[in-house]
Amino acid sequence: MKIVFTTSGTDLDAPLDRRFGRAPRFLVYDLEGQTFEVVENRQNLNAAQGAGIQSAEAVARLGAKAVVTGHCGPKAFRVLSAAGVAILTSDAPTVAAALDQYRSGALTEARAADVEGHWA
Amino acid sequence: MILAVASGKGGTGKTTMAANLAWTAAAEGMAVQFLDCDVEEPNGHIFLKPVFDSRRSVTVPTPEVVEENCDGCRICVGVCEFNALIVLGERALVFPELCHGCGACVTACPRNALVERGRPVGKVESGDAGGVFFVQGILDIGQVLATAVIHAVKEAARKEMPLTIIDCPPGTSCPVIESVRHADFVLLVTEPTPFGLHDLKLAVAMLRALGKPFAVAVNRHDAGDEGVALYCREEAIETMLNLPDDRRIAEAYSRGELLLETLPRYRPFFSRLLVKLLSARQKEAAR
């Protein structure tokens, strides 16, 4: 199973980015193989509008079943839910720490958007 | 003549200038119309008191997905400049609140899987206001496409009118550009304060980029400082009106009264301003 972490960096020690739609990169972690790849999200980071839904579509297309991020707005939440991607919010400082939280079952699935659009 | 009354800074007196100019023109026997293009907060009606006899909805063409025709090719997603479309599970999904109604997705779709339907974003009302033909646009709450409503206001205006006065929104962004783009002349209203000067400079830069002739009207001109006057002198910008800082003007405004009806002593200020504007237009036309 693949799980996406929002990040500004390129490895597991990088910070977990609080933003979903305008996260600079997605770190796609494969739980079975314990490997990861990093996908740029620059075009959405710089989008005038619609960053949340475009990022949500991108995450769905990566084949991820869950996304771990700081916060998620209403439109991104709608798309991720429709695509069957679980949304988990975390305040972990790094991707590795968020991954540990996920593995230990400390993260629960969000039932609704926890911020308004354009909150940052 | 199409005259747009604009300003960089909000609250400088655009509506006061525009409404009293329209009243003056009508009082002097000119056929005049007033277009309130400040569609996020139209307030010209408070002072000119129109009786509306026509009202229509403003819609923006927005795509809907014909699911049986869509194969999720993502061509529409690629052409949308506004990120209003995504594809999930091989079906396009539209986010109407992000759509600007440009129609690119419908044109680009190779399978006729997108059809346009009108999405209401506001309304346009028109009627008579004591001899002034009055049109105003109102953007619906929660909508953002002010330019679509402004366009509809101009469509609802009468053609071949000797004088059209456009009350613009404040600022220098898209709604202002849409409001001033067909104007022959622009009157920039400002106040003699650092804020007024700062935003006047932005508005001047906008009008110069658009190649529009303009002049300045200074409201509350004996309050504040010399900055605006010095700037206009340096830039060779004509100041056509200096309206004094008079508490009675503010009181009339706060009661929703038209300045020139309550304080007739100011009528010559606006008669002279109207003459200057009309002759400036003639000079521009002769150039």
Image (cartoon, rainbow, N blue to C red):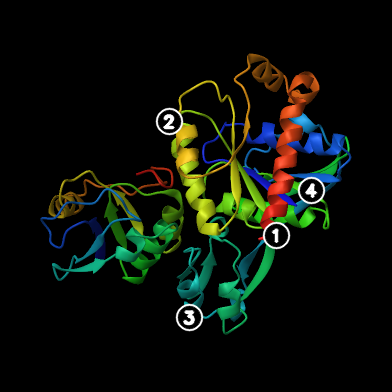
* Same-subunit check for callouts 2 and 4: yes
Mark 1 vs 4: CB contact within 8 A: no
Q: Which mark is residue B163?
A: 4
For the residues labelled 3 and 2, the Cα–Cα distance comes to 54 Å
- Parent chain of label 2: B
Horizontal placement of A105 versus B141: left or right? left
Mark 3 vs 2: CB contact within 8 A: no
The type of residue carrying mark 1 is Ala
Q: Which numbered disc, 3 or 1, marks the residue that appears first in the sequence?
A: 3
Q: Which numbered disc, 4 or 3, marks the residue that appears first in the sequence?
A: 3
Disc 3 element: loop
The type of residue carrying mark 4 is Leu
Residue at the spot of label 3? B73
Horizontal placement of B266 versus A45: left or right? right
Where residue B265 sits: x, y (%)? 76, 20
Query: Residue B262, located in which quarter of the rendered image?
Result: top right
Q: Residue furthest left?
A: A13
Q: Which numbered disc, 3 or 2, marks the residue that appears first in the sequence?
A: 3
Disc 4 element: strand
The type of residue carrying mark 2 is Pro
Within 10 Å of disc 3 (Cα), the crowding (few <14, some 14-19, many 20+) is some
Residue at the spot of label 1? B286
Front disc: 3 or 2: 2
